[in-house]
Amino acid sequence: MRRTALLFAAPFALALAACEGGATDPADASLSEAEARELAAAWDGVAAGAIAGFGPLFNVQEAGGPSAAAITTTTSFERQHACPAGGGSSIEGTLAITRDPATRTGTMQMNATRTDSACAIPARGRREGTVTITGSPNIQLTGNHAWTNGVPGVHTHTQKGSFTWSRSTGGTGTCTVDLTGTLTRATQSYTLTGTFCGRTVNVTRTRTS
């Protein structure tokens, strides 16, 4: 395992693109199921882009060789990422990495806050235009991952919070997010449960390649 940006980025991208379910929150009723699903995938892609930019911060190759002592490092970070049609998103938090080169085991834990500032995303479907998202106040992100003998284990992440949205062709609302995703690398399966924009989510996807 040389670089683990995708351990954080890929689960986010897989997660919200797979959202399915029925409406559960009248406050989000003006976003159709298809709109919520499209918005979720594009909005999630902004976070994935920001996290992928960490580069060496996510490199967990055992520096120092097998005789090196176990070590824990905690790094603060702040990243900004442009949204597809204007505005942007800021992600700020800490990343704690514990690794033992002798046994090639370790853990990573991310705790962060995502704040969207007029993050504009192209709308797809019959209404088209754009949807602009602003944190209300923000989204809390967590990510956890472990590896044993150099083999990646289960990755989990959560996203909780809310944002306001407005559509350029008309319509506004508040979207709540409460998602838990689990990625099992050994089987290439991803399970996402929770809610997004008033839609109940409980899906499992398996990659075939």
Image (cartoon, rainbow, N blue to C red):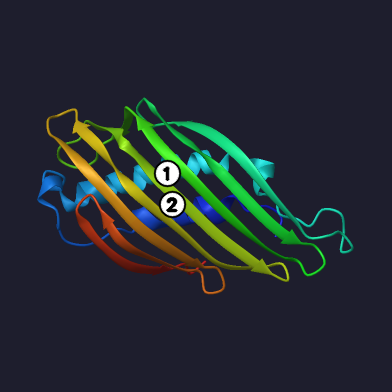
Question: In this figure, which residue is indicated by the disc labeled 2?
Answer: 13
- 91 displayed left or right of 162: right
| Residue 199, horizontal then vertical, whole percent | 21, 56
Label 2 near label 1: C-beta < 8 Å?
Answer: yes
Residue extending furthest toward the bottom? 187
The residue located at (16%, 38%) in the rendering is 173
**Secondary structure found at label 1:** helix
The residue indicated by pointer 1 is 45
User: Given the image, on which type of amino acid does mark 1 rest?
Assistant: Gly
| Quadrant location, the N terminus | bottom right
Instruction: Please provide percent x and percent y for residue 115.
Output: 39, 35
- Which disc, if any, is residue 175? none
Instruction: Give the class, few, some or many, for how many residues have Cα within 10 Å of label 1's Cα (few <14, many ≥20).
Output: many
Q: Is residue 167 left or right of residue 137?
A: left
Amino acid type shown at disc 2: Ala
Compared with 92, 37 (above or below) is: below
Q: Distance from label 1 to label 2 (Cα)?
A: 6 Å
Please give the name of the residue rendered at 65% of the width and 48% of the height, measured from the top-left corner: 58
